[in-house]
Amino acid sequence: MIMDTIAKLVNGTFADPDSDGKTTLSVPTRSVVIAGSLKGMEAEVIGALDLEPPFAVVSDPDTHAVMGERVERAVESLVPVVRIRLGKNPHADMKTAEALVAETRKAGTLIAVGSGTINDLCKYAAAKQDKPCAVFATAPSMNGYTSVNAAITEHGHKKSLAAVAPAGVFMDLEVLAAAPKRMIQSGLGDTVCRATAQVDWLLAHLLFESEYREAPFRFLADDEKGLLAEPEALVSGDLEAMGRLARTLVLSGMGMTVCGGSYPASQGEHLIGHYIEMMRPTGGNEIFHGEQIAVTTCVMARLQERILSGPPPRVSLTQATKQSVLSHFGDEIGAACWDEFDRKRLNEEGVERLNARIGQSWPDIREKLLTVNTPSETLASVLQSAGAPVNFRDIGLDESFFLDAIGHAREIRNRYTFLDLAADAGMMEPKTLA
């Protein structure tokens, strides 16, 4: 039934719940293969797409050892291959992305062998050259496999940039289950944030009448129930549980694609995560993206619960100024942040309008938000059962830095979340959330 959802989205027959089923939804990805094992099938699944040769197969030392070498051999039986090996632990930054664009000039198609970083780099490089790409996943660590955006850092500022959706996504569950546990836990972290992201996105819609869609959450509902019920199975090698996670990651990316942006999967919890990635002092232990999101999801869930359990909030003029943003982030990153943040700051007219909206409709708004909310205790319990981090100490962060992340994350991007509502209503109190 769940694989049917993927198949229907691929072939364009999924009934859109936001149009009462009168129209159908489709995604640009043409093939998704999730199998217990893909050994011996690599040439078959990629060949069925009839992509433009030659193929640039992109991996790093770790993903090459896990799957890249066998993908190269299989693809070479079909078309000429350009082997591109990135350095160990590559970064999804503009410098690396531009270098990859240069290295793949003569390729017709990019084939990513990896997870978050390699997938984002290849999707972005393919988009810059109007070329197709495909991906062989090596870890269930993030939900961006099928999305049309890539998280790329430019001048120190984490951005979500336009990318091409992969024509094919191929997931070998044996490979995914053998990935380092931290990567599996990271994928779970990037999955459970559906709860806080949906509440944040719906909040903005109810307050400002901005766009909101039910479809991306309908995609995930059935598989999410299974994941929340048995999270410990993910780290025990259970292929059925891994299949649920893999499908959820694929469908989350498709939800972003259908919505034309990361809105259904990236809200306040990701803003805090992006702050950590942008501002964390160098030299600390590596933190996987989904590990951060596991922790920041717990923070956002507590913040959302606290505001929803209290009286209607009343906002005031936004206190942050251009000078305060530049002072905190530095001139270069701060200028980029201010360009985003300035668009959602509340002026006197905005304060009056928003307080009127809250005063008139808060009981109805609260009820609708609680309908899609998942309790913070449930989210923390699920993550802990899988051994995933749930607080800043678990990922080696300094408390004062983490409190800054909670307090200043909203200044990174023009996306209205409970971080904004709490700050403008004088209800932030980062220390009580960490």
Image (cartoon, helix red, strand yellow):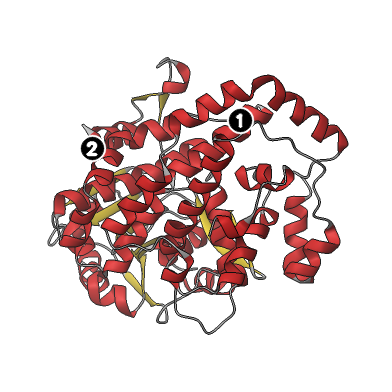
Near-viewer residue (74 or 54): 74
Give the residue drawn at x 45%, y 63%: 391
Which of the 4 image quarters holds residue 316?
Answer: top right
Q: Which of 56 and 277 is in front in this view?
A: 277
Q: Which residue is drawn at 70% across and 48% down?
A: 423
102 over 115 or under it: above or below: below
Image disc number at residue 40: none
Number of the front mark, 2 or 1: 1
147 displayed left or right of 307: left
Determine whether the residue tagged by mark 2 lies in a helix, strand or loop: helix
Could you tell me residue 107's position as x and y percent? 42, 65
The quadrant of the picture occupied by the N terminus is top left
Label 2 belongs to which residue? Answer: 3
Residue 260 in sight from this viewpoint: no
What is the distance, in whole Å, between disc 2 and disc 1 at their CAs?
Answer: 30 Å
Q: Give me the residue at 37% from left, 53% from top.
A: 380
Locate residue 387 relative to residue 217 in the image: left or right.
left
Q: What residue type is labelled 1?
A: His
Task: Residue under label 1, please give it.
Answer: 205
Q: Is residue 355 left or right of residue 258?
A: right
Q: In this view, does 166 lie to the left or right of 275?
A: left
Where is residue 278 drawn, in percent x and y?
60, 68
Residue type at mark 2 is Met
Residue 85: image location, x then y, percent: 38, 78
Q: Can residue 427 be seen in this view?
A: yes
State the residue in front, 149 or 194: 194
* Marks 2 and 1, the one that precedes in the sequence: 2
Name above or below for residue 284 compared with residue 55: below
Q: In which quarter of the image is residue 206?
A: top right
Residue 124 % position (x, y): 51, 59
